[in-house]
Amino acid sequence: MDTVTTTLDRLGPVAQVRAGRLGRRLPQLLVGLAAYGVSAAMMLRAHVGAMPWDVLHQGIARHLPWDFGAIVIAVSVLVLALWVPIRELPGLGTVLNAVLVGLFADLGLAVLSDPGTWWGRAALAAGGIVLNAAATACYVGAQLGPGPRDGLMTGLHRRTGLSLRLVRTSIEVTVVVAGWLLGGTFGVATVAYALVIGPLVQLLLPRFLVSLPAGSPARRPVRPRPPRRGSSR
């Protein structure tokens, strides 16, 4: 029996699909993206502060006649354009993330209502943060490509040599400030999210990480072909 990996692998788009176990990985990816969109809607309905990127999305929504989900998709496409100079590798999960999170956020907003009490808002926001951490671990653990915003973070980390913590913090501070200036909701839940999302994802990721077979085509080392007879090389 093949041994399996226990860490995230850096694979190209074709290698991600060829790595196997799609019967587990693809449904997990879809569940994770759906839960991520719903978690965003939960925090928005709580009205005590959105996730950092959603502060930006919410701010933009105040100036455009678009649904919230459409703005999430549009920003995702713009962020993907920033992948070109940093040479980050996309995947099936990257494309689905860019589209589905916004759609499920709109669905969540249509189903959820605003809580009428402060404790209801606090509970909805806390539940949204926990669900978001589980959703992130779920779709990242499927190993089918990072989301547009995750890839921007890891790509800048790889290209600049700066720590992931510094890169993530810098990006999220930038989008929060921009979103707040545009009219997005910055609040206690935004701060709570920034403080706990990293440790929560780190705790949950091993539970959702789908190990890839070491003998799968995507993980087999590429060996140079022996020179043909008569070749000068």
Image (cartoon, rainbow, N blue to C red):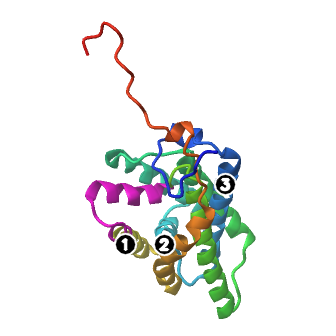
Q: Report, in whole angstroms, how far the alpha carbon at label 2 lies from the one at label 3.
A: 24 Å
**Is residue 73 at least partly visible in the picture?**
yes
Mark 1 crowdedness (10 Å alpha carbons): few <14, some 14-19, many ≥20? few
Task: Judge whether 101 appears above or below 233 on screen.
Answer: below
Q: Which residue is mark 2?
A: 55
Q: Main secondary structure of the magenta part?
A: helix
Under tag 1, what secondary structure? helix
Q: Which residue is mark 1?
A: 169
Residue range of the region highlighted in magenta in the rendering: 147-168
Determine contact: label 2, label 3, CB under 8 Å. Answer: no
Percent position (x, y) of residue 200? 54, 75
> Which quarter of the image is occupied by the C terminus?
top left
Q: Which residue is mark 3?
A: 30
Task: Judge whether 155 appears above or below 63 on screen.
Answer: above
Which residue of the protein is positioned furthest toward the front in this rendering?
1
Q: Report, in whole angstroms, how far the alpha carbon at label 1 lies from the one at label 2.
A: 15 Å
Which residue of the protein is positioned furthest toward the right in this rendering?
111
**Is residue 67 at least partly visible in the picture?**
no
Closer to us: 213 or 97 = 213
The quarter of the displayed image where residue 230 is located: top left
Percent position (x, y) of residue 49? 53, 81
Mark 1 or mark 3: name the one nearer the start of the chain: 3
Mark 1 or mark 2: name the one nearer the start of the chain: 2
The answer to whether residue 79 is left or right of residue 137 is left
Amino acid type for the residue under numbered disc 3: Leu
Amino acid type for the residue under numbered disc 1: Thr
Percent position (x, y) of residue 178? 38, 70
> Which quarter of the image is occupied by the N terminus?
top right
Percent position (x, y) of residue 20? 62, 42
Q: Which residue is depicted at the point 66% across and 45% down?
A: 22
Q: Which residue is depicted at the point 58% across and 38% down?
A: 18
Q: Which residue is depicted at the point 40% across and 70% down?
A: 172
